[in-house]
Image (spheres, helix red, strand yellow):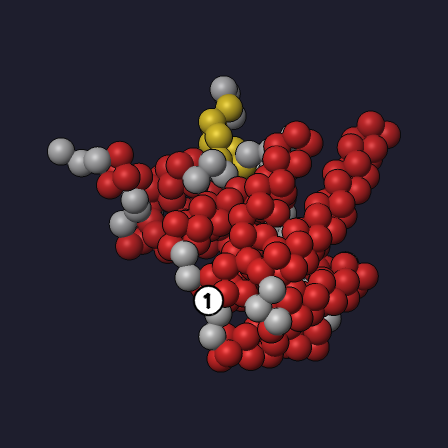
């Protein structure tokens, strides 16, 4: 008898379809409220309907997809309260990661984090900047050396994908993020866990404030239509 985890894990083609759909959510190709039609997706992804069905089931298990009566599988939309809760949890978890990394990170890992942030600064805005930012945060998480924390943050990051494209598409936010990363790095180099946690929390809260403004602008646009 299969466990619940085994029944939600897609096969090889389903896994490929799953990651492609994850990328589309991250890039904003699939937006909150978009319907996931099996026939359309199978044609676009070049696979049969079975892997697409497996991928949709996994996205639903991740909390990224919901079933709406008469519409079927749909990319979830997050309300204001849910967005606030996600960012509060992100500040707690990534702040903890920074505090642990101050104690556990090797000098090699700290050098790599510096190099990644320099590459982020060179990338400016756009998809490459968003990718380098993800790598920076993933590398810091690895440096924290706590598997249970890693699992919690990875789960949270999937939920954050529903918010759409990275804020690093905005030039001001991209520049600010580089500076905020440097504040975290200074604390890590000093092996000051408390300062590293505070710097990371400040970084996440800055991103949260910008996301709130984006939500307010979106809602005003809806009201005006």
* Vertical relation: 173 (above or below) 214: below
Badge 1 crowding class, 10 Å Cα cut-off, few under 14, some 14 to 19, many 20 or more, is some
The foreground one among 92 and 26 is 92
Is residue 35 visible to us here? no
* Vertical relation: 220 (above or below) 136: above
- Residue 6, picture quadrant: top left
Residue 117 falls left or right of residue 137: right
Residue 87 falls left or right of residue 209: left
How far across and how far down the image is residue 33, in percent? 60, 34
Residue pictured at 76% horizontal, 45% vertical: 209
Helix, strand or loop at disc 1? Answer: helix
For this orientation, the residue located farthest to the top is 69
Is residue 190 visible to us here? yes
How far across and how far down the image is residue 108, in percent? 49, 80
Residue pictured at 86% horizontal, 30% vertical: 224
Residue pictured at 50% horizontal, 20% vertical: 70
Residue pictured at 58% horizontal, 60% vertical: 193
Give the residue pinned by disc 1: 104
The foreground one among 116 and 183 is 183
How far across and how far down the image is residue 180, in percent? 71, 63
For this orientation, the residue located farthest to the left is 1
Residue 192 falls left or right of residue 213: left
Q: Quadrant of the N terminus?
A: top left
Residue 82 falls left or right of residue 107: right
């Amino acid at each position: 008898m299969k466990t619940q985890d085994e029944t939600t894990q897609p096969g090889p083609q389903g896994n490929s379809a799953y990651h492609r759909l994850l990328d589309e959510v991250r890039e904003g190709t699939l937006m909150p409220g978009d319907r996931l039609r099996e026939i359309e997706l199978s044609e676009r992804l070049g696979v049969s309907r079975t892997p697409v069905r497996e991928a949709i089931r996994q996205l639903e298990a991740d909390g990224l997809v919901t079933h709406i009566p008469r519409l079927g599988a749909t990319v979830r939309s997050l309300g204001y309260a849910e967005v606030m809760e996600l960012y509060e949890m992100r500040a707690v978890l990534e702040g903890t990661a920074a505090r642990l990394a101050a104690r556990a990170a090797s000098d090699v890992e700290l050098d790599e984090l510096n190099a990644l942030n320099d590459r982020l600064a060179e990338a400016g805005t756009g998809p490459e900047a968003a990718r380098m930012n993800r790598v920076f945060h993933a590398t810091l998480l690895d440096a924290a050396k706590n598997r249970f924390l890693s699992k919690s943050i990875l789960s949270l990051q999937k939920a954050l994908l529903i918010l759409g494209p990275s804020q690093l598409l905005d030039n001001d936010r991209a520049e600010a993020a580089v500076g905020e990363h440097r504040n975290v790095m200074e604390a890590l180099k000093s092996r000051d866990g408390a300062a590293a946690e505070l710097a990371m929390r400040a970084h996440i809260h800055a991103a949260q404030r910008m996301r709130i403004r984006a939500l307010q602008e979106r809602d005003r646009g809806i009201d005006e239509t």
